[in-house]
Image: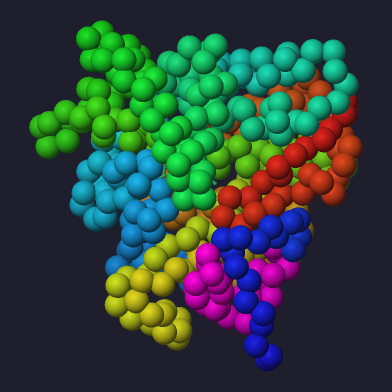
Amino acid sequence: MPAAELHDFAYEDFAGNALHTLLRENRERGPVQPALFGGEPAFLICGHQALAEAFRDNNQFPPADAYRITIEPVQGVTFQTMEGAQHRLYRRLATPAFQSRVVDAMEQDGLARIAHELIDRLGTRRSADFAHDFTHRVAFAVISRMLGIPTDREDDFRDWAVGFLEFPRDPVHSRKCAEQITHYLLPILAERRRAPRDDILSGLVAAEVDGRRLTDEEILAHIRLLFSAGASTTTDALGNLVYTLLAEPARWQALLAEPALRAGAIEELLRWETPVAILPRLSAPRTVVFHGTEIPPATFCLFAIAAANRDPAVFDQPDVFDMHRDSSKKLLSFGPGPRLCPGMHLARRQLAVALDVILERLPGLHLLEPEDAVPRGAILRGPARLAVGW
Ligand code: HEM
């Protein structure tokens, strides 16, 4: 086979089907393929079996190393940037933040309330950029409310959270936004230490590691982690869901007519157009041989979840969006193994509730500029704009 042109997965746009075509061509060549990442030589891991193995192999692919470069300087030290026993300990400690009563309460009626409020804000308009007005707001509002941030400061908080995620592209702005989050949360944290409430901040204040309480900085770092791991991912999943359903109006009509299909549509979306399409890891600081390929020390290995989710060895007719497919056990979208996404339950609920509310309130929703609305990006992948009418 002729040598393939190498693509840079850090920079290119990969609009719409371009990403999936490129990933299919790579996967057909073999499970580990050369690529570029940020101008540096890298490897793409794109077969389902190989990727499921790589996710579980923390020796050859230690997860924390990449996060230490890409996010820790601005997010702070969290269990995401720890390994082994320390990762497990801190993860257990912070996990109640994802599964506590606060999350349950949010699921009961908080999620629907946020979706209704955002649609109320559309007022009497008949068209909008649904990304700007809805899909880019829901997940940030969910986390802000779980933290107990006053609703009138939610938009500021969202801007800071989006800004701090600009690291490493814009380190100055990113640091400034992270400081604004700190400045805003410190007095609330002090307040929760004096008078705990039923919220995530109070849970983190009360948590103990090895008999010691977390410091303010440790708590703030874990709050920033909630935004970096939980907000943009769910935002893009929701954007991809709305785009995918509206791009083929028959899908939208089917979900209006048969609500029982909605859960299947969400699972299929998570397979077919998952928001974390590629997850960058660094290989171990020694030469690694993986599926016959020699990988030099500390090389970026791009975990191509979007490629594995369409591997024909595992999924029949993988390029077909099929709401009746049962693929949940084979999905790699939430990263199997010790790093399995602790927010996946919350993410699925957000998608389900938002979809129900949109279908109920805006049944005539349709795309006005389909070509502009396609998902873009490779690391995080979603539509930048969704011009819709209703
Ligand atoms: C559709 C939405 C989501 C997707 C596709 C997603 C995907 C992922 C993936 C692939 C990982 C594994 C990363 C790795 O192996 O390095 C992960 C980890 C993580 N996710 Fe999610 N996620 C989503 C939503 C959320 C939400 C809503 C939260 C919390 C509010 C969250 C919090 C986290 C955290 C804290 C980790 C780090 C786990 C660890 O390092 O042990 N995620 N997620």
Residue furthest out toward the top: 195
Residue name at image x 88 percent, y 21 percent: 126
Q: Where is residue 237 drawn, in percent x and y?
A: 63, 42
Q: Where is residue 274 drawn, in percent x and y?
A: 62, 51
Residue furthest out toward the left: 211
- Tell me if residue 354 can be seen: yes
Relative vertical location of residue 113 with respect to residue 307 in this rendering, above or below: above
Left or right of residue 270: residue 80: left
Q: Where is residue 264 drawn, in percent x and y?
A: 67, 43
Say if the magenta span includes residue 374: no
Could you say which quadrant of the image residue 306 lies in? bottom right
Residue name at image x 32 percent, y 70 percent: 284
Between 70 and 278, the one nearer to me in the picture: 70
Q: Quadrant of the C terminus?
A: top right
Residue name at image x 77 percent, y 17 percent: 122
Relative vertical location of residue 370 with respect to residue 181 in this rendering, above or below: below
- Tell me if residue 48 can be seen: no
Residue name at image x 84 percent, y 32 percent: 388
Left or right of residue 48: residue 99: left
Q: Where is residue 252 drawn, in percent x and y?
A: 82, 37
The range drawn in magenta is 19-47
Residue furthest out toward the front: 172
Instruction: Name the colouring of the figure.
Output: rainbow
Between 318 and 83, the one nearer to me in the picture: 83
Query: Number of numbered discs present?
Result: 0
Say if the magenta span includes residue 24: yes
Between 302 and 54, the one nearer to me in the picture: 302
Q: Quadrant of the N terminus?
A: bottom right
Relative vertical location of residue 314 with respect to residue 371 in this rendering, above or below: below
